[in-house]
Image: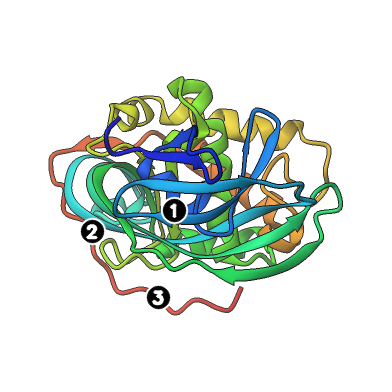
Amino acid sequence: EPDNVIVFDAESGDAIGEFDREGSITAVHEGAIYQVEGETWKVERFDYENRRAYARAVASDYFTDAQTETEVRVLRLEERGLRKRAKAPEEGGEDFAIWRAEVHVTTLATLYKKIRFYTRENLGAEDIVLPPEEMDTDAFVLTISNESLAELMESADLVADRGATWFSLGGLLKRVAPLFLRCRSGDLGVTAQLASGHFRRPALYLFDRHHGGIGLVRLFYDAWEEVLGAALDVLRACDCLHGCPACVGPPDEAGPEGKAAVAMLLEFFLEGGRPQPTSDLEPLLQEPPRLAPA
């Protein structure tokens, strides 16, 4: 594709690889270790404007891991399924909702870490200085009311970090979804907001990482119950006690009770009745309640 980044051998000038534009800011930034066909290369220069990166073959004992910040802004809401709160359905309050939306995604690469092979020792970090990548695409959005989330946590008596739990749920769904969407994990992006500026409640966005979208979100919206059910199966089948990289992530990321909290959320979404389609696409705004510290 004309907008892809071509990776060249800095010595011979031969092309050795190609990367999509959005992924290039984390894969071939200056200082990145680029691996292709069993060889390791270090990127010496990234000509972002002309979509060219220049790398030199090296014997490296570390790889690089780039960190990003992603902002998702809702442009238009296209479809919603809503489950009303069982305690006060006549008031129209939301229990949780699923959405299809058009969104604008801004991704900024901030820094990269040098991680030693095998031992995973952190050898230090350096800044990445590149402009943000922006695109308009489609997103599947999952929202839960502040009241429902607070009641869940209190009823289960879990000492869980709400933010870590919500982010861990997003990561798990991103890993499971490709089995149903028949895509690569890299085709989906995920970001989690505990206090969404648009919805004014926790919102989880799983977005198509292709400009304009290629239909993945439509598939996700239609198969969301299967995806969440498979995610719950992963948790139940995992032998770990408090979380691990095979399910919700290690406890230092998901929290000591992160696995139990994510499982509780999935059961809540799947077992309390299906959300019903609604023609009203405006979020049911509410004043966020004052929640006790997690």
Between 225 and 74, the one lying in front of the other is: 74
Q: Is residue 253 left or right of residue 228?
A: right
Mark 3: secondary structure: loop
- The percent coordinates of residue 203 (x first, y second) are 39, 56
Give the numbered dot on residue 284: 2
Between the C-alphas of marks 3 and 2, the distance is 14 Å
For the point 35% across and 38% down, the residue is 4
Q: Residue furthest left?
A: 279
The amino acid pointed to by label 2 is Leu
Mark 1: secondary structure: helix
Mark 2: few, some, or many residues within 10 Å (few <14, many ≥20)?
few
Work out whether residue 255 can be spotted. Answer: no
- The percent coordinates of residue 122 (x first, y second) are 76, 64
Say which quarter of the image contains residue 123.
Answer: bottom right
Foreground label between 2 and 1: 1
- The percent coordinates of residue 211 (x first, y second) are 26, 39
For the point 55% across and 47% down, the residue is 55
For the point 48% across and 22% down, the residue is 180
Foreground label between 1 and 3: 1
Which residue, given by chain and number where applicable, does mark 3 sit on?
Answer: 289
The amino acid pointed to by label 1 is Ile
Along the polypeptide, which appears first: circle 1 or circle 3? Answer: 1
For the point 13% across and 39% down, the residue is 279
Between the C-alphas of marks 1 and 3, the distance is 39 Å
Give the numbered dot on residue 25: 1
The amino acid pointed to by label 3 is Pro
